[in-house]
Image: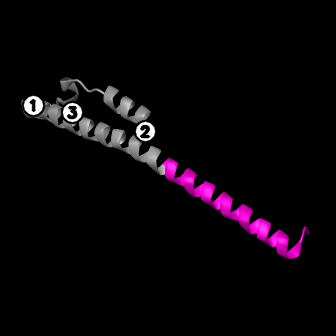
Amino acid sequence: MDTVASCVGNLTLDDSAFWCGDGISIAAAPIYAGYQKFVQDRCREGSAECEQIGEALNRAADEYDGTDEVSAETLTKIYGNL
């Protein structure tokens, strides 16, 4: 997500990109800039969230692995090696 945030930050449109034949259309440029900043900020927040989610998933996977090992040992004690 950091890469996405960086790419979003590099997206630019000159004021002339908003020209539609009248001067009022140029007013869209600051609106675009504000929206671009909003999206970039959300992407940066997503980067931190993705890291936290990844860490939580790794911890959960480790717990599952641990319980699988315990279950396998218990079943081996009960039924022996099959």
Residue denoted by label 1: 22
From the viewer's perspective, is 28 left or right of 9?
Answer: left
Mark 3 vs mark 1: which is more N-terminal?
A: 1
Q: Residue furthest bottom?
A: 78
- The three-letter amino acid code for the residue at tag 3 is Ala
Residue at mark 1 to residue at mark 2: CA–CA distance: 38 Å
Q: Which mark is residue 1?
A: 2
Tell me, yes or no, whether the two marked residues, 1 and 2, touch with CB atoms within 8 Å.
Answer: no
**Alpha carbons under labels 3 and 2: distance apart:** 20 Å
Amino acid carrying mark 2 in the image = Met
How far apart are the alpha carbons under marks 3 and 1? 20 Å
Residue hosting label 3? 33
Residue 37: image x %, image y %? Answer: 25, 35
Question: Does 7 sit left or right of 71 as displayed?
Answer: left
Magenta region: 54-82
- Quadrant of the image occupied by residue 69: bottom right
Q: What element carries label 1?
A: loop
Q: Nearer the viewer, residue 36 or 41?
A: 41
